[in-house]
Structures are given as C-alpha cells and as structure tokens.
Image (tube, grey):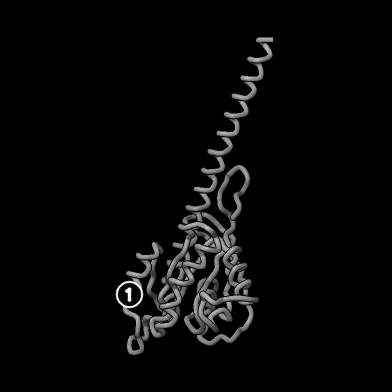
Amino acid sequence: MTDSGAARKMTRAKLVVLGRDNCGKTALCVRFITKRFIGEYDHKKEVTYGCRKVVDKEAIDLEILDTVNKFFSYPLWECVGPAANSLESSIKWGDGFLIMYSVTDRSSFESVSRLKRLIDHGKQTLGIPTVIVANKCDIENGRVVRTEEGQALAADLRCSFFELSVAESAVAVETAVWQLIREVRVEFNKHLLAMDKRSRMLQMRHALKNKLTRSKTMQW
C-alpha cells in the first residue's frame, strides 16, 4: 500500500487469493478483471494479475496474486519446506486476502479457518483485511456446505462473507473484491493516523527536550 504524496490516498493494493484446487480462484480473478467467465484452467505456477479499477470514485492500481495449491498436498499445520516458504511469502506480500471455498467441496470449506490462522500468524497481528467467498452456489444438487455454515464461520473469524457463483455473476464478484479493497483502505488510513500520532509525539518530545536544554543553559 502506498499513498500519493500530499493527497495521502491509497493508490495501490496487493490482494492474495487463497483456497484449495477447483474452488474457482483463477476464474474469479479473470472474471473481476475482464468480466468474462472461463471455466477451465490448469496452471501450476502462481500468477499475478495487474489492473486499474475505480472503487468509490477513487482509482486504484491492483496486483492480484492467484496462488497455487502445493501446500495443500499435506495438512496445513505440517506445511514445511518450499511449500511453506511460498505460502509465507505470499502472505507477507499481500495487503488483503480473499479466501475461497466451493460449496460443493467440504474439504475446501474446512481449510478456510486454517488459512485465516496462517494469515494472522504470518502478519503477526489480528484484523488483517480478509474476505471469505463461497463459490458455486449455482450448483444446488452438489452442495455439501450450507449457507448458514459459511456465515457462521465468517462471523467466528470476523471476516466479511459472500456466497456467489463466479460463473453466473460478474457483479457479485466485483462486490466481494470491492469489499476487500475497502477494508484494505480502512487499514491504510489507520496506519496513516498511527504514523501521524507517532510523529506528533516525537515532535512534542523534541520540543520539550529543547525547552529543557534552553532552561538549563539560562541557569548557567
């Protein structure tokens, strides 16, 4: 995240899309950027997409990291070696996170809370902007995760929640990603306020130190 000089607005943001295979991560990225839906993807390397969007009448340059899933080949708490390093670097890189699962795949749903814990651990703080997206809600016959389960999990993790179909609605995808951008912007503004407060405190300390120094000089 960076500001634009005097305006001090967030002009860039880095978003990371996480989730198991076949939950629709790449389809969501492409849908958000181009509004087109392409259902079949097969890539084995992380891909970073770049685009410029206008959110709440403010232009923002986005980098969106579509992660690979090699760290899901074994339990997340046993994630070690190159897979762990890749996940850790992705988390450290991002400003905000979108965790996806498919309502037709319970294992993808069960990975959400573990991914959120890894985000919190990687950033070493709580409250990192994170949106949970339940995809493939158009496939009712294959549904194994109820809407209420997703809502309850998101509430427990203190994340925004969206249930949608990437295949059916570009608007729903935009709404979810825009929410994440707004949350990143809120954290950016909090960071600026904290920096301003620290700067004012340092200025006050410096002024007090100078005053004490002048007072001692006058006594001599």
Mark 1 residue element: helix
Q: Disc 1 marks which residue?
A: 149
Residue drawn at the location 57% of the way across and 63% of the way down: 94
Asked if residue 109 can be seen in this view, the reply is: yes
Q: Nearer the viewer, residue 215 or 91?
A: 215
Q: Is residue 194 left or right of residue 216?
A: left
Asked if residue 35 can be seen in this view, the reply is: no
Q: Position of residue 146 (x, y in %)?
A: 32, 79
Q: Position of residue 185 (x, y in %)?
A: 50, 54
Could you say which quadrant of the image residue 212 lies in?
A: top right
Q: Is residue 190 above or below residue 83?
A: above
Q: Is residue 80 left or right of residue 131?
A: right
Q: Position of residue 100 (x, y in %)?
A: 46, 75
Q: Residues within 10 Å of mark 1 (few under 14, many from 20)?
A: few
Q: Is residue 131 above or below residue 58?
A: below
Q: Is residue 196 above or below residue 94?
A: above
Q: Is residue 88 above or below residue 36?
A: above
Q: Nearer the viewer, residue 218 or 40?
A: 218
Number of marks present in the image shown: 1
Residue drawn at the location 54% of the way across and 60% of the way down: 123
Q: Amino acid at mark 1?
A: Glu
Q: Nearer the viewer, residue 196 or 162?
A: 196
Residue drawn at the location 41% of the way across and 78% of the way down: 109
Residue drawn at the location 41% of the way across and 84% of the way down: 105
